[in-house]
Image (cartoon, rainbow, N blue to C red):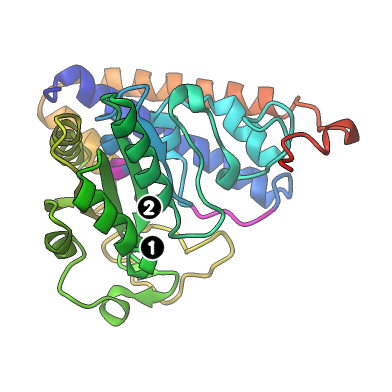
Amino acid sequence: MPLTNDIKLNIYRYMYAAERWEATLLRLIEQGVVSGIYHAGRGHEGTEVGAVFALDKNDYLFYDHRGCGHLIAKGADMTSLYGDFLGNELGSTRGLGAGIVHVCDPDLGIMGQSGTLGRGQLLATGAALSAKLRGTTQVAMHFFGDGSSNLGTFHEACNVAGAWKLPVVFIVQNNGWAVSVPIEYSTAGGGIARRADAYAMPGLVVDGTDAFAVYETTSMAVERARRGEGPTLIEAKLVRMRGHFEGDPDHYRPKDADARKDPLVRTRQRLLDEKVADEAQLTQLESTVKESVQAAVESARRGTMPGRSRIFEGIYV
């Protein structure tokens, strides 16, 4: 679908919602209300939202561990998302799984993720195979980081997807750091997208802080997959604006590029420069989003915890 002004405005709306939703979650973590490890998605909003906007509702999303922008863009309910992190029955798993790893809503095409990083490529490839065997036009999309691109499962998934021309889009969110290891130290070959040549698929590089460029690039890959022409590997180059996880002091990472490459700031300015919206309209949009986020967290905190009677639900024998 062409990048219309309505799509541009909605991309920013969901990016802003993702940032505000996460900022509120971080306060819950600081207050000790939410436990566990969270990997913030600040700086990834442009890629996560821009790419997912290229999908249809019944397409498959296999997200990664960083942030929730892709989930919110796919239609995940913000109250339910908070419920998942709070571990109560308002979450998508009704309290049986806490945190981002367990968020799942098949009705929206949100298929969850592997509990082990780097295994989602296989799940997305399997979903794409299912779509091809069933003769549907569904596309699978998987997000993962530059660190996960160095695992054997990445190459296995790309090989099968390329050989069988499966409808899957692999999106590498390359923020230059695998935890605290710089990509120059961990990854050879001069770019992750170049690996696509070995698996008979296009390898595209996009500025991951430019949400509109991400949308247009991903839309081409999605439409290619729908036509039965096979997978695409997209390397989105962006900036991780917080530590690897909450609690990581992040001393090892230079911060000089953060302000210049903030996807929210860049997208907002584009809307103003291109006269898609004026300052008053954007301020009203942002105010509405803030109200929605506040209502979501207040509702989620009223959720009840699961009782012992549910402890054996979902057990396979």
Identity of the residue drawn at 34% across and 66% down:
255
Tell me the residue that label 1 is attached to: 153
Residue 238 visible in the displayed image:
no
The N terminus, quarter of image: top left
Q: Return the mark for residue 162.
A: none
Q: Return the mark for residue 121.
A: 2
Identity of the residue drawn at 43% across and 28% down:
109
Which amino acid type is marked by label 1?
A: Thr
Identity of the residue drawn at 80% across and 27% down:
304
Q: Position of residue 151 (x, y in %)?
A: 38, 68
- Would you call the spot at circle 1 few (<14 residues within 10 Å), some (14-19), or many (20 or more)? some
Name the one closer to the observer, 269 or 242: 242
The residue tagged with tag 1: helix, strand or loop?
Answer: helix
Q: Where is residue 139 in the image (x, y as percent from the top left)?
A: 29, 33
Sooner in the amino-acid sequence: mark 1 or mark 2: 2
Q: Main secondary structure of the magenta part?
A: loop
Name the one closer to the observer, 14 or 71: 71
The answer to whether residue 295 is above or below residue 143 is: above
Which amino acid type is marked by label 2?
A: Gln
Residue range corresponding to the magenta coloring = 36-47
The residue tagged with tag 2: helix, strand or loop?
Answer: helix
Identity of the residue drawn at 83% across and 38% down:
311
Q: Where is residue 82 in the image (x, y as percent from the top left)?
A: 62, 34
